[in-house]
Image (cartoon, rainbow, N blue to C red):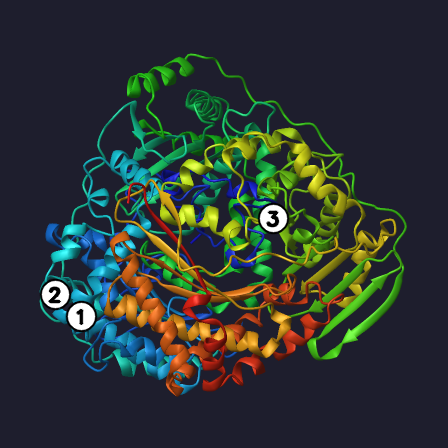
Amino acid sequence: MIRVSRLALVLSAGLSLSACATLSHHKSGGNDQAAAPSTKASATPAATPARTSGAPTIDLVKPGQWPQAVSDVAPDPRVRFGVLPNGLRYAIQKNATPPGQAALRLWFDAGSLDETDEQQGLAHFLEHMAFNGSKNVPEGDMIKILERHGLSFGADTNASTNFSETTYQLDLPKTDDDTVDTSLMLLREAAGELTIAPDAVDRERGVVLSEERTRDSPGYRVFVNTFGFQLQGQRPPQRLPIGKTEILRTAPAQRIRDFYQAWYRPENAVVVAVGDFDVDAMEAKIKARFGDWKAVGPAGVKPDLGPVAKRGLTAKVLVEPGAQTSVQMAWVLPPDLELETRAKDQEELVKALGFAVLNRRLQVLTRSDAPPFIVAVAMQNDQEHAAQITTLAATAQPGHWNEALTALEQEQRRIVQYGVRQDELDREIAAMRAGFVAAAAGEATQRTTALAGAIVGTLDDREVVTSPSQNLAVFDEATKGLTADKVSALLKTQFAGSGPLIVIPTPTAIDGAEKAVTDAYAASAKVPVAAPAAPGVTAWPYATFGPKGAVASQTEVADLDTVFVRFANGVRLTVKPTKFRDDQILVKARVGHGLLDLPPASQSPLWAGSAYIEGGLKQISTQDMERVLNGKVWNAGLGVEDDAFSLSGRTRPEDLDTELQVLAAYATEGGWRPEAFNRIKTYYGTIHDQLESTPGGVMSRDLGGLLHGGDGRWTFPSRQQIAGASLEQLKSAVSGPLAADSIEVVIVGDITVDKAVAAVAQTFGALPARADVPAPAGAEKAPFPAPSSTPVVRTHKGRADQGQLFIAWKTDDLFSDLQRARNTQVLAQVMQLRLTDELREKQGATYSPSASASASVAFTGWGYLAVSVETPPDKIDGVIASIRQIAADLRDKPVTADELERAKKPRIDQIEKARETNEYWLGALSGAQTDPRLLTATRSVLAGLQRVTVADVQNAAKAFLGDDKSWTMIVKPEGK
C-alpha cells in the first residue's frame, strides 16, 4: 500500500528544527531510496474518515490469512507468502543487497492495548524476558550465542513493543546454515518456550524501570497528555507501552506468563525472512522449526478501543517546564478500517498531494521576514485503529503562541475555502513522482533490512506488501488527469469530526489559560482570508560556472576500485563507482580544514550552521530553488568535520549535474539571509531550558566542552552567547574557508568515472584556481581533561530518580599506533560485554550501558575509551565502583577466548556490512588524497581487528585503564 511517510504523533512531543539542518527536496516523497515511498500515504496523510459506503473493512482479513486474499491489490511478486497449519504466517524474499546477509523478524499481533488493568507494562516486560531464559536456552546464554555468530546486542539483536504489535529483530551477518538455524531456533524459543522464571523477572525489573526513566522527559510528558486529550476516554492513552511503574516493580512472573500464553500464539505471529539465501531452503527451515508450535490455554480477546468523543472547539494548555512552546490543532474522526484496495490507494495519494500543498504553504510562512512560527506541519495519522487525527502543528517563538495559532487557523481555513491551485498541485505531483521514480529505479538493490522493515510495516494495518515499481504505477494512475478541484474537495473533508482540539504545550503558564486560547481562535476565525497568490517564475542561475575545468592528473587506486583526479584549478576529485544501490549517488565537497580552522579560544558559531543552507544562495532563495529545481532529486547540507567543512548531498545519475551545481553554488555564493539565522537563533533561545530538563540533555550540552578542556570549538554556547550571536559571526567563521581554501569532491555510487569527471569539470573544476592553504599552526592540538578522583558534577531539573555518569580514560590518536588503536577498540567491546552482564543483567541498575573508543585522525594525541551509564542518583557510586572493578579485572586478568570472540566478531561483521554501503566509502575516502594514512587504515581495518589477541586486550587495559587515569562526569538532580 502507499505510504509516502509514516508519522505517528511526532509533533505531540514537540517540533524540532531537524528540517532546518539540511535543505532537501522531496522531504515527503523521499530522495533517499532507503526511505523511499511505498504506496502508503500518511503524513502527507495516512487514511480517510470512516465511510458509509459499505466498503469492505480490515476485519475481512482473518487470522492466518494474508490480506491479498481478499483485496484487489496484487502483492510484490518477489515475496513468497505462506501459512502453516497452526496459523503462523511467513513472508520470504531473496535479496543480495548486501550479499551474504539476512534479516529475520518475528512479529506478534499483540501489544500494550491487549493488557488488562493489572498487566499495564507487561507486554513490554515480556519482550525483555524473551532474552532471559527459555526451555532450551539458559538465562544469559541467548545474547552470547548470537554474539558468537557475529550479532551485536542492540544493533543486530533487538525488539520493540508498541500499542498493538511486538517485533523481534535479528540481522544476520552471514547466511550459513549454522547462523540461520541458530537464529530461527532462538526465535522459536521466544515464540513459545520462554521460562519467565520469577528470579529472572526480579533481576529484569531494574532494567525495565531504567528504560522508563530514560524516556521520561518534557517532550514525552507532552506527548502523553496530548494523546490523552485527543483520544479522550479511549483505550490507547490508558495503555502506554511502558506501563505503570508500580506494576513493573511488583507484578509476579505468572502475570507476565498469562499475557504470554494469551497472545504469543501461532495464529497471531508472522515470521519474515529477507536475505541472500535459497527461498525453498528457508521455507523448509521455517516449517520445520515452527510447525510444531501449539498455543497453550485460551486465546486473548481483542479489547474495544472506545468511541471517539464528540467535541467542538476545545483547548488544553500544558504547562511543562523544559518543553518547547508549540501549537497543535487537531480534528479527530472515527478510525479508517477500510480494507486496502486499488481505489483506496489512489485516493490516499490524492489526499497526500493536498497535504503536500498545505505543507508547502506553511513552509513559505516559516521563511518569511516575520515568521509566525519556527516550523510547522500538517498531517493525518491513524491512531492504533482507534481514531483518525488530522493535525496542524507548529513550534512557536517563546511567548508568541497566539501568532502561531492565528497563522495555522487561517492557513487551514484558506485551503478549505479556496482549495489548491493547479500549479501547486502540478508541482507536488512532480516532486512526489521523483521519489517514486527513484525508488523504482533502485528496486533491484533495496537493502535487506529495509525490505524486512517494509514487510513488517504492513502487518498491523493488514496491508498488502508491494514493490516500488508497483507503487510508481499506482501513483501514475492516480495522478493521470488529476485536477485541483478533486484534490481540494477531498482535502476539505479531512477537517471534520471532533474539534478543533487545540493543545498548547508551554514552559510557563498562559494568562487566561484555555479561555485565552479559544478566544484567540475565535478572533482569528473572524478575519477574512484571501486566495493565495501564484508564485513568480524564477530561472536557475547556477547552471554554468565558466569554461570546463581541465584534468591535470588521474590516478587509479585499483585495490579500492577508486580513482583520484586532480583538476588544473587545484580541485581534487575522488570517485568510487559502486553497485551497492542502483540509482543512488552520494556527493561530498570538503573545503578548508573544519574545526582546525576555528580559533580554540573563541566560542564556535557553528551551532547555527544550518542557517547557511536555509539562507539560500546569493542569486536565489531556498524557496525559489525548490520551485525551479522541482522534480529533480537533490539536497544540500553543511557540516563541520574535524579537518574540513563539508557540503554534502545525495542524488541519482540523471540529476548529478544539478546536485553538483547546487553544492558548487553553496561553496561560492551563499545567500546569508538574516531571516534563516534569526529562525535558528529563536529556536536556540530556549534550548538550555530543554536540555536542563534531563540528565542526558545536560550531558550532551556540557560533555563536549569538558572533554576538550573548554576549547571553544567543542563548547556549547551559553544563554548569553546565543542571545548575542549574530549572522556576521557565523559568516566570518565559514565564508573565508568556503571562498578561498582548497576543495576536495568525493563521489560514491551508481556512476562511472568518466561521467563524474565530466560533471565536476563543469562545476567545481570550472572555479577559479585555489591554493592549498595550510591549517593554522598548532590547530591540531586539543586539550583533554586531567585525570581526577573527584567527578565533575552537573545538575538537571528533571525527575529526582534520574542520573547519568560518564567515565573516560585518555588513549591516543589513531595514527600514533594504528594496531594499538584497534586493540583499544576491541577492549571497549569487551568492556561493553561486561557492563551489560554486570550492570544490566546482574544488578538491573541500567537499561543500556555503553562503552566506546574514539581515536582522532586530525588532533594529535587525542582519543579516549569511555563508559556511559544512566542510573538513579543513589546507585551512581555503586555503579562507578563496579566500572572500576571491571577495569581492574581487565588490567589484571586476561579475557577468555570466548569473550574475545564475542567482542571481535560482531565488530568485524558490522564493518563488513558497512563496507557494502555507499555511506561507508564516502566517509572512508574523505581526505584520502591528502592523507594516504587513511587508505592504509581502510585497507587494514578488518585484518587489524582480526589479529587482536587476548594479550593485546590486556596490554591495552594496562596502558589506559588505570583508576588514577580516569576522568568522571556525573549529572544529578538539583538539590542532590
Please, is residue 243 above or below residue 733 in the view?
below
Q: CA distance from mark 2 to mark 1?
A: 9 Å
Coordinates of residue 463 in the picture (x, y in percent): 36, 56
For image coordinates 14% across by 70% down, the residue present is 199
Q: Which residue is mark 2?
A: 253
Q: Quadrant of residue 614?
A: top right
Q: Nearer the viewer, mark 3 or mark 1?
A: 3
Q: Nearer the viewer, mark 2 or mark 1?
A: 1
Name which residue type carries label 2: Ala
Q: Which residue is mark 3?
A: 713
**Observer able to see residue 645:** no
The reply to whether discs 2 and 1 touch (Cβ–Cβ < 8 Å) is yes
**Which of the two labelled residues, at mark 2 and mark 1, occupies the earlier sequence position?**
1
Given residues 369 and 53, the one toward you in this image is 369
The residue lying at 77 percent from left, 67 percent from top is 753
Above or below 240: residue 933: below
Is mark 2 in CB contact (under 8 Å) with mark 3? no
Q: Residues within 10 Å of mark 3 (few under 14, many from 20)?
A: many
